Amino acid sequence: MVPTPVAGVRSFASDNHAGVPPEVLAAIAEANVDHAIAYGEDPWTARAVQCFRDALGEQAEPFLVFTGTAANVMALRAACRSWEGVICAETAHVNTSEGGAPERIAGVKLRTAPTSDGKLRPEQIDPLLLGIGDAHSVRMRLVSLTQATELGTVYTVAELRALSDHAHERGLLVHLDGARLANAAAALGVPLRALSTDAGIDLVSFGGTKVGLLGAEAVVALRPELALDMQFLRMQGGQLASKSRFLASQFIAFFEDDLWLRLARNANAMAARLADGVRGVGGVEIVQPVHSNAVFARLPRPAIAPLQARWPFHVWDEPNDVVRWVCCWDTTAEDVDAFAAAIAATVAGQGLRSPVQ
């Protein structure tokens, strides 16, 4: 459980806790004029589609949806038949945080590989290609990668290209769960297409909500054949917005003037500031590289509950006292510095501070 935020205190539990940027709210208000044809036959949706193509390439076919879970399930359903499966990291969001939706709704089996940093390696794919051609075994069809990973780390362009090439050589498709794709691109200083189209990705679950949009996500097919049935999958999944213009207008704001980049850069920068702010605190250990907008740290157990009483955050790995702190598009330096000071004071107040080595 994550405690309820105290009035006036920012949450470090999730980038879903943040509100909506004023530019996005203004775009929604601008779309709220007169009547418009429903179900995506409006000028805003057409413009948003072109924004996706400008960012990812003219072959991109985006389908707007409300949730990241729905985007992932749709992507898996588009790629896999009922006797096929998905290879992913053990920590992948589709495996740990979708409430069983990939198995229950997409009807696919997940085969996972352990990783220390959330990133799958090409050599981990082959051992999971079990029973090829055997009707008694699930046939693997798709590799799913989370970018940025659930541990806050980021696949480089070269790592994605190597994974895509390896998968394609074995007849597999590649899906990118890009709930924090904007944060990854901002961290690496590359355009969005460098981590998707140019890296050989076939399907993208394109995240908007965690960067500040209001329930706006997308499934983007980067191969024409994968887009053929997507409209039916979206309808069956209850994700076809009748008033599509209100999702589309947000993505227009997201892409225009690189708003996504400014929002993601701030979240990433605040995470780096937070990590720097606690590295000198005895008893606090950063346990993952801080690549994007999340910090994973080990805290002395007695300090966790007192901190959570005022500053909401997740205990990620309870047996090992590892917590996760997430910074948002609107996290400020003042927020971070106050939280870092509270961490230091709480650890010291619990008599847990040890000399810095």
Image (cartoon, helix red, strand yellow):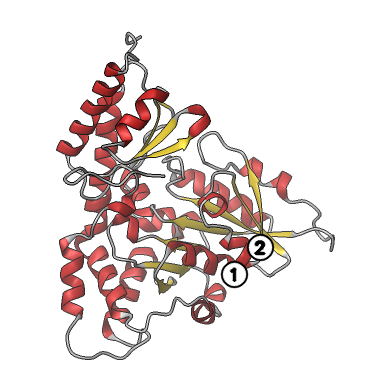
Residue 114 position in % (x across, y down) = 61, 39
Figure quadrant of residue 298:
top left
Q: Residue at x 34, y 88 (%)?
A: 38
- Image coords of residue 7 (percent x, y): 18, 46
Q: In the image, what residue type sits under mark 2?
A: Val
Label 2, label 1: how far apart the Cα atoms are? 8 Å
**Residue for point 28% across, 63% down:** 213
Q: Secondary structure at mark 1?
A: helix
- Where 39 falls versus 111 (above or below)? below
Q: Badge 2 is on which residue?
A: 108
Q: Residues within 10 Å of mark 1 (few under 14, many from 20)?
A: many
Q: Quadrant of the N terminus?
A: top left
Left or right, 149 with respect to 260, comes to right
Q: Earlier in the sequence, mark 2 or mark 1?
A: 1
State the image coordinates of residue 346 (x, y, percent, origin top left): 27, 23
195 left or right, relative to 42: right
Q: Is residue 79 visible?
A: no
Residues at circles 2 and 1 in contact by the CB criterion of under 8 Å: yes
Q: Residue at x 39, y 25 (%)?
A: 299
Q: Amino acid at mark 1?
A: Arg
Say above or below: 161 vs 116. below
Residue 342 x %, y %: 23, 28
Q: Secondary structure at mark 2?
A: loop
